[in-house]
């Protein structure tokens, strides 16, 4: 019996998400984010959910969030104006491979 090493996308695919479409648990102040020069959120999110659109605006899709809080810690300019865990029954359910 051997151990099979799984890559990151495969591991993330094991998780189950119940997305709260009515109340996102993370909200951004896009005016602050557009002025942020370092934009650490684009590189620290392990799920890669922060994106830079062609207009230089940071976008975020809370579906698929791992709820690790790394973005909140790394956001130096306080562009993340709200970060809470999702409401009860919503969010991520981790599964083991």
Image: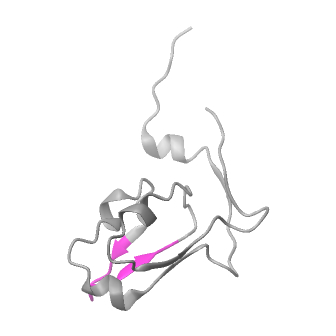
Name the residue at the top extreme. Answer: 1
Query: Residue 88 in the image: x percent, y percent?
Result: 78, 64
Q: Which residues are magenta?
A: 51-61
Q: Nearer the viewer, residue 33 or 81?
A: 81
Q: How many marks?
A: 0
Is 55 contained in the magenta span? yes
Query: Residue 25 in the image: x percent, y percent?
Result: 61, 72
Quadrant that contains the N terminus: top right
Q: Is residue 57 visible?
A: no
Residue located 64% across and 64% down the image? 85
Q: Nearer the viewer, residue 36 or 93?
A: 36
Residue located 42% across and 53% down the image? 46
Quadrant that contains the C terminus: top right
User: In screen coordinates, is 11 left or right of 87?
Assistant: left
Query: Residue 7 in the image: x percent, y percent?
Result: 43, 37
User: In screen coordinates, is 1 left or right of 51?
Assistant: right
Name the residue at the right extreme. Answer: 89
Name the residue at the left extreme. Answer: 37
Query: Where on the picture, by quarter, is residue 23?
Result: bottom right
Q: Is residue 76 visible?
A: yes
Q: How is the image coloured?
A: one colour
Q: Is residue 9 above or below residue 24?
A: above
Query: Where on the picture, by quarter, is residue 40?
Result: bottom left
């Amino acid at each position: 019996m051997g151990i099979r090493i799984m890559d990151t996308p495969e591991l993330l695919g094991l998780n189950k998400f119940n997305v709260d479409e009515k109340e996102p648990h993370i909200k951004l102040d896009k005016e602050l984010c557009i002025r942020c020069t370092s934009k650490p959120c684009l590189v620290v999110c392990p799920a890669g959910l922060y994106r830079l659109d062609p207009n230089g605006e940071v976008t975020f899709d809370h579906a698929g969030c791992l709820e690790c809080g790394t973005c909140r810690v790394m956001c130096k300019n306080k562009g993340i104006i709200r970060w809470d865990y999702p409401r009860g029954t919503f969010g991520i359910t981790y599964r083991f491979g």
